[in-house]
Amino acid sequence: MKKDFFLPDIGEGIVECELVEWLVTEGERVEEDQAICDVMTDKALVQIPAVHAGTISRLYVKKGEMAKVHAPLFEMALAEAEKDDAGDCTNADQEHAEPASDIGVGAVISEPACAPSSENRAVASPAVRRLAREHNVDLTDVPGSGDKGRVYKEDVQAWLQAQSSPSRRSSSWREPVTGVRAAMARHMSASLGIPRFTFCEEFYLDELMALKQQLAGEFEQQGVKLTLLPFFIKALSLALSDHPLLGARLEENGQTLVYEDGHHVGVAVDTPSGLLVPVLHHCEDKSLLTLSRELQRLSAAARAGRLTQGELQGATISLSNIGMLGGTVSTPVVTPPQLAIAAMGRLQRLPRFDEQDQVVARQLMTVCWSADHRVIDGATLARFNRCWQDYLEQPGRMLARLH
């Protein structure tokens, strides 16, 4: 008995997804809960599992095409044991489907054991397949170094290096803009239609650096590496308590501001698949140690491609630590419905005049804001930044307000 299976409701109002990769082929036998395909939403890679055991008889959507929610995704000949239990997979049933989190569709980029491979299919994780797609590589051409020929990221990188030798290099090559980069292109194009302005200021961080050095040993005992970013996030949360407008969001009609319950800070992370912005929720309730742990976990998950959709949603304000890559000044782009984003530059030791007109060495960082000028004016942003800056330049004031 053959049945059509439909792309389930993944939630967040998503009506279509890009079919990134089929993990099975027509005629292949699959087991219940086996991964069938990867689809890409605007924010994450989602793996669709088999609801029943059986044999794949037809794949309705081609790789690279858009799959519609509640539309047929693949056809399966059910195994005998499954026929009596299988319900009718009709459009009417799918209209009442639960969100993905309730039906076993994990909204994560994970590296589970790969589905059984056919003769012409390379064995590789979704993250490796994504890397291969980004470089227009056919994985069946890449020698795998793992068990049963499994292809790892290092194998793809070595293959690319070999192909880029002078004797193999061509004059040009092309690759489609898909996945995270395609989502970024859409979001950034939309955000550039927003009237915005940039505001920059130098932060003197000598006292903060001294405090960081004092606390670093205690954090290391807890297995956590202390960086400046948790201080910036905590100070930002304190400033939002004093100036809540910067943490509001503007609804699409441009006429309503929504003030969220809590301070949810997005932090931009550079990953192999593009820029991702995981979110630290309710920073007002988190200690510096908790923020440090959460930052380490989310950054590692982002680079490994294992963030959930919940960890990518709900930011009310964002930080971009461009200084980690060596930049000093940046003009970040506001992502609606957020109203503001700050870019932290590289920490520098530079000469400055003190109050006695003596030249002294100062540890400083240039921070640049971009804000939605439909809601926030220059004076409002300057006052907010001054509040944030004071907490960082005088960290004792920040510690006094921690609970």
Image (cartoon, grey):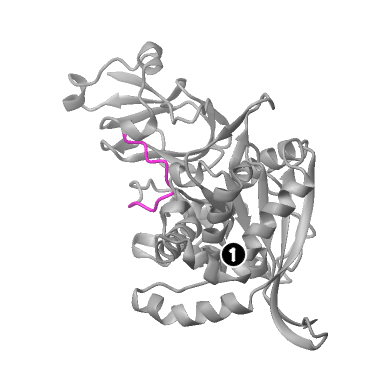
Neighbourhood count class around disc 1 (C-alpha, 10 Å): few under 14, some 14–19, many 20 upward: many
Give the quarter of the figure containing the N terminus. top left
Q: Is residue 134 left or right of residue 98?
A: right
> Can you say whether 49 is above or below 400 in the image?
above
Asked whether residue 176 is in view, the answer is no
Asked whether residue 298 is in view, the answer is yes
Count of numbered badges drawn on the protein: 1
**Quarter of the rendering containing residue 171:** bottom right
Q: Depth check: 274 or 269 in front?
A: 269
In the orientation shown, which residue stands out farthest toward the top? 92
> Can you say whether 85 is above or below 32 in the image?
above
Give the quarter of the figure containing the C terminus. bottom left
Q: Residue at x 65, y 63 (%)?
A: 389
Q: Residue at x 51, y 41 (%)?
A: 314
> Can you say whether 92 is above or below 317 in the image?
above
Q: Is residue 85 left or right of residue 319?
A: left
Q: Residue at x 64, y 58 (%)?
A: 387
Helix, strand or loop for the magenta stretch, by majority: loop
| Residue 107 belongs to the span the image colors magenta | yes
| Residue 299 belongs to the span the image colors magenta | no
In the orientation shown, which residue stands out farthest toward the front? 356
Q: Depth check: 7 or 15 in front?
A: 15
Tell me the kind of residue under disc 1: Tyr
Q: Depth check: 330 or 47 in front?
A: 330
Q: Secondary structure at mark 1?
A: helix
Q: Is residue 202 left or right of residue 246?
A: right
**Quarter of the rendering containing residue 135:** bottom right
Provide residue 366's location: percent of width, then percent of height.
73, 67
Q: Depth check: 162 or 290 in front?
A: 290
- The region drawn magenta spans 104-113
Q: Which residue is mark 1?
A: 391
